[in-house]
């Protein structure tokens, strides 16, 4: 029980630290097959945490109200290790992405505004789903 408590503490501290490094991202625990909608303004971000993500492949679909205004920053967390998988700019109004992972773990997707887009698009709404 003590090992589980320590593992959970380290996991949540790691996630908290990652959110501190991104633009004020609020976390949400998500599940497969559900859609989540939000609107972001300048400097905002939103984090989606998908626990027990599939190693055979997880697809991420995002539909945005404006092209080149949102970016997705991916993290993969397993065995008390967090890997930064990089950032993708959503260059169209619709984005389909995702990947397969070698170890079972947690996929963390942070949706952020592209800084150069805030003048042209003060707020951008989007819908994201995980399959």
Image: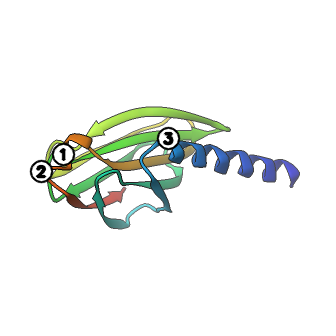
Label 2 CA crowd tier, 10 Å (few <14, some 14–19, many 20+): few
Task: Name the residue rendered at 33%, 44% in the picture.
Answer: 72
Q: Is residue 102 visible?
A: no
Query: SS of the residue at dot 3?
Result: helix
Dot label at residue 120: 2
Residue 68 appears at what percent x and percent y? 17, 44
Between marks 1 and 3, how big is the CA–CA gap? 20 Å
Q: Position of residue 78 (x, y in %)?
A: 61, 39
Sooner in the amino-acid sequence: mark 1 or mark 3: 3
Kindly check if marks 2 and 1 are in contact, taking CB atoms under 8 A apart as contact.
yes
Q: Position of residue 84 (x, y in %)?
A: 48, 33
Horizontal relation, residue 10 to residue 14: left or right? right
Q: Secondary structure at mark 2?
A: loop
Task: Give the labeled residue for mark 1.
Answer: 117
Q: Residue furthest front?
A: 119
The x, y position of residue 97, in whole percent, is 29, 43
């Amino acid at each position: 029980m003590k090992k589980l408590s320590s593992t959970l503490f380290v996991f949540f501290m790691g996630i908290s630290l990652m959110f501190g490094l991104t633009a004020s991202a609020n976390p949400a625990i998500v599940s497969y097959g559900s859609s989540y909608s939000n609107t972001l303004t300048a400097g905002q971000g939103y984090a989606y945490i998908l626990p027990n993500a599939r190693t055979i492949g997880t697809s991420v679909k995002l539909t945005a109200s404006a092209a080149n205004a949102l970016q997705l920053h991916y993290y993969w967390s397993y065995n008390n290790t967090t890997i930064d998988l990089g950032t993708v700019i959503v260059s169209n109004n619709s984005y389909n992405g995702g990947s397969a992972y070698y170890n079972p773990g947690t996929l963390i997707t942070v949706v952020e505004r592209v800084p150069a887009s805030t003048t042209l698009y003060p707020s951008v709404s989007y819908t994201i789903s995980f399959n």
